[in-house]
Amino acid sequence: MKILVTGGAGFIGSHLVDRLVAGGHDVRVFDNLDGPAHPESGIPRYLNKNAQFIKGDVRDYDGFKKALEGIDVVFHEAAAVGLAQSLYEIKRYVDVNIGGTANLLNILANEKNRVKKLVIPGSMSSYGEGGYRCGNCGDIRPSPRSEDLLRRGVWEIPCPHCAGSLSPRPVRETDALNGTFIYSCTKRSQEEMSLIFGNTYHVPVTVLRYFSAFGPRQSLSNPYTGVAVIFLSRIMNRHPPVIYEDGLQMRDYLSVHDIVSANIAALEDSRSDGQIFNVGSGRPVRILDIAGEIIRASKSDLRPQVLGQARKGDIRHCYADISHIKQRIGWEPKVSFEEGLRELLEWSRGQEAVDKFDHANDELRTRGLL
Ligand SMILES: NC(=O)c1ccc[n+]([C@@H]2O[C@H](COP(=O)([O-])OP(=O)(O)OC[C@H]3O[C@@H](n4cnc5c(N)ncnc54)[C@H](O)[C@@H]3O)[C@@H](O)[C@H]2O)c1
Ligand SMILES: [Zn+2]
């Protein structure tokens, strides 16, 4: 099949391109080599030589139209990514993520094409605060924590009804989307627009809500990417990993290879059509433990610096219920957190890491976002 991967020169997109090429597909990449994913200029060396590369921007309607010529399947990975940045680069996030998707769907709705399937990456961040259970009140999706509680260093969320303690539970696809970043809101719009388009024009669309991905090719110089690589970049520069709150907040981390295999499963199994799937590990990990594992695996003597301070928009816990994708198309993650980390560390040895973390935080502080 002839497959277009927008954002195919990025972290997840490039691994997906490799798997598609290995699977015998004819792959085209459409990417503007933008932003933090591409600190070096030009096409990244890792980009698969057997894929066709078109440098272009999803905001450019005519360029996108050309890239879609002759295409059967689109994986729309191109996006402005990063949570905190989206709180002040609002127009760019909306233009690239919502505007880019609007271009894609508008072209498919109005121009002659043969696209038979769309796979759209959603994001864990669209859920906002995760799911919880209260012993007295049952299932709870609490509102974001108040600034007053955070100022007083109360990190865990009390039950909004009885003020009792809550225990985290995994989020399901049917849970409400209560995102706390502009980025979250753009990813949610991408999902909704694509599914509406698919229903209207009978084009199979699958939404894969990725949780936090990590692995080789993730930028070691991007202070807005996932915590695992931010910690690693700090350690490589002999700076301690910096941890917000108390470090006991939980996230869901999975290897980029598992994200890729979920995309392949969505492509190959038509029972994925019209579905939204969480793509996570289903196994919560504490931020402090991630720092500890990376320090240990890098044989470093640094100790995490726990700030006891919260960032704007940060949620306390969120991890995935992956039973829907397991049951419907049989996908499940195969790479353990420890294995994924080993691979990340091995890859990082040949890489340069520029630690821009403090600089990024200064930027947030001047904007009152920290
Ligand atoms: N990495 C994660 O943990 C994660 C989690 C949830 C969702 N996602 C989603 O997965 C997708 C891929 O993310 P990633 O982590 O590989 O990010 P990335 O930044 O490594 O890759 C994104 C790619 O898109 C390209 N791009 C950006 N703006 C563009 C534009 N205007 N036109 C054309 N190309 C453009 C970039 O050059 C880059 O190569 C995104 O849609 C992102 O929202 C990622
Ligand atoms: Zn209660």
Image (tube, rainbow, N blue to C red):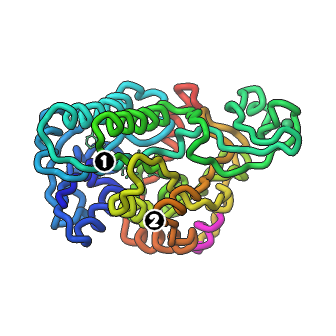
Give the x, y percent position of residue 204.
Answer: 33, 47
Left or right, residue 282 beside residue 111: right
Quick one: label 2 or label 1, which is nearer the N terminus?
1
- Write down the quadrant of residue 101 in the picture: top left
Q: Helix, strand or loop at disc 2?
A: helix
In the rendered image of this protein, does residue 245 appear above or below residue 143? below
The segment highlighted magenta reads 292-299
In the rendered image of this protein, does residue 265 appear above or below residue 342? above
Q: Residues within 10 Å of mark 2 (few under 14, many from 20)?
A: many
In the picture, the quarter occupied by the C terminus is top right
Mark linked to residue 84: none
In the picture, the quarter occupied by the N terminus is bottom left
Give the x, y percent position of residue 128.
Answer: 60, 38
Q: CA distance from mark 2 to mark 1?
A: 19 Å
Q: Is residue 50 magenta?
A: no
Residue type pointed to by label 2: Asp
Residue type pointed to by label 1: Leu
Is the stretch drawn in magenta largely helix, strand or loop? helix
In the rendered image of this protein, does residue 25 appear above or below residue 100? below
Q: Residues within 10 Å of mark 1 (few under 14, many from 20)?
A: many
Q: Helix, strand or loop at disc 1?
A: strand
**Disc nearest the viewer among 2 and 1:** 1
Q: Which residue is mark 1?
A: 118
Give the x, y percent position of residue 316.
Answer: 68, 43
Instruction: Give the residue displayed 43% in from the left and 60% down from the top.
Output: 259
Instruction: Give the residue displayed 39% in from the left and 55% down from the top.
Output: 219
- Write down the quadrant of residue 303 in the picture: bottom right
Label 1 beta carbon within 8 A of ligand 1: no
The answer to whether one can see residue 169 in this image is: yes
Q: Which residue is mark 2?
A: 258
